């Protein structure tokens, strides 16, 4: 646990969407260790509840939320306000990758629409309603979205995922202009390849296989882990980044330089 002198989020209230596994899970743990009350939002009920038990219920709670449904996002934010009285941090992290490769000649529009409902519409809903909650209570909060290294490059497969992450970056850069004037910072974190359960399942490979593939694309020795990304999110959520706004913080081990 982080010592009380080093707790960067003491007294803060945070929502983490997609918080039951992967980057979301690790970030929920980090937020809690830095003194925040954390609402874990996901559709993986068993994993979400198990994480609350692991972290400790006095520090966090689980609320089921499908971010593709704006009404569920509204309910998530309202429930957080009822539980804790305010919202300081929104980590809009929920996202998916289609299990089918999406090249342009065989582009599956239905699959694209399902992915965009989560990765883009869901992200916009989380930014919108968390910002409204902060404005209503005059909270100078922090909103962080999960983008990707795919937000700034092209791809010959998984095109819909790449499109969605470009949209997230556009959302962050645009929302930061309006909300910055209100004292609310909006940034994104762009991870490189991480062997999360979602990635392993969609690619049909083991964690070890995925890590070997990703390690070869880094200019640093070692493997990028969810904890590296979570530490970056804590920075963006805390006062350490009080004058950082509209920024895309890339955490990729140097992938973009290789």
Image (spheres, helix red, strand yellow):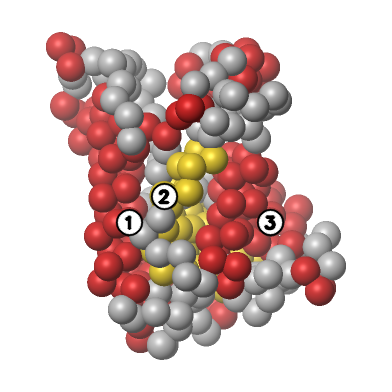
Contact? badges 2 and 3 (CB < 8 Å) = no
Q: Residues within 10 Å of mark 2 (few under 14, many from 20)?
A: many
Residue depicted at x 32% and y 29%: 153
Q: Quadrant of residue 104?
A: top left
- Where residue 128 sits in the image (x, y, percent)? 30, 66
Dot 3: what SS?
helix
Q: Residues within 10 Å of mark 1 (few under 14, many from 20)?
A: many
Marks 2 and 3, the one that precedes in the sequence: 3
> Residue 248 — which label?
2
Residue depicted at x 71% and y 66%: 34
Q: In the rendered image of this protein, does residue 87 appear above or below residue 217?
A: below
- Nearest the viewer among 49 and 142 is 142
Q: Quadrant of residue 53?
A: bottom right
Left or right: residue 183 versus residue 220 is left
Left or right: residue 248 versus residue 118 is right
Contact? badges 2 and 1 (CB < 8 Å) = yes
> Residue 172 — which label?
1
Dot 2: what SS?
strand
Q: In the rendered image of this protein, does residue 43 appear above or below residue 130?
A: above
Q: Nearer the viewer, mark 2 or mark 3?
A: 2
Residue depicted at x 59% and y 60%: 235
- Where residue 24 sits in the image (x, y, percent)? 56, 48
> Residue 30 — which label?
3
- Where residue 23 sits in the image (x, y, percent)? 57, 43
- Nearest the viewer among 201 and 27 is 27
Q: Quadrant of the N terminus?
A: bottom right
Marks 1 and 3, the one that precedes in the sequence: 3
Residue depicted at x 55% and y 78%: 83
């Amino acid at each position: 646990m982080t010592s009380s002198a080093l707790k960067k989020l003491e007294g803060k209230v945070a929502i983490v969407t997609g918080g039951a596994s992967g980057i979301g899970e690790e970030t929920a743990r980090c937020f809690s260790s830095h003194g925040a009350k954390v609402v874990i939002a996901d559709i993986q009920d068993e994993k979400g509840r198990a994480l609350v038990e692991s972290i400790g219920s006095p520090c966090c709670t689980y609320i089921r939320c499908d971010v593709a449904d704006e009404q569920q996002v509204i309910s998530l934010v309202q429930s957080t306000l009822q539980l804790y009285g305010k919202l300081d941090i929104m980590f809009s992290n929920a996202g998916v990758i289609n299990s089918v490769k999406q090249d342009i000649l065989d582009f599956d529009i239905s699959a694209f629409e399902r992915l965009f409902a989560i990765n883009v519409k869901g992200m916009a809903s989380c930014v919108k309603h968390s910002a409204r909650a902060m404005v209503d209570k005059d909270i100078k909060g922090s909103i962080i979205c999960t983008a990707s290294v795919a937000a700034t490059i092209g791809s010959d497969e998984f095109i819909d995922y790449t499109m969605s992450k470009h949209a997230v970056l556009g959302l962050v850069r645009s929302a930061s202009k309006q909300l910055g004037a209100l004292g609310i910072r909006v940034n994104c974190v762009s991870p490189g390849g991480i062997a999360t359960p979602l990635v392993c399942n969609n690619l049909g490979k083991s964690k070890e296989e995925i890590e070997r593939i990703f390690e070869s694309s880094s200019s640093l020795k070692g493997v990028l882990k969810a904890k590296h990304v979570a530490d970056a999110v804590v920075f963006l959520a805390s006062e350490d980044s009080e004058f950082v706004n509209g920024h895309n913080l890339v955490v990729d081990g140097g992938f973009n330089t290789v």
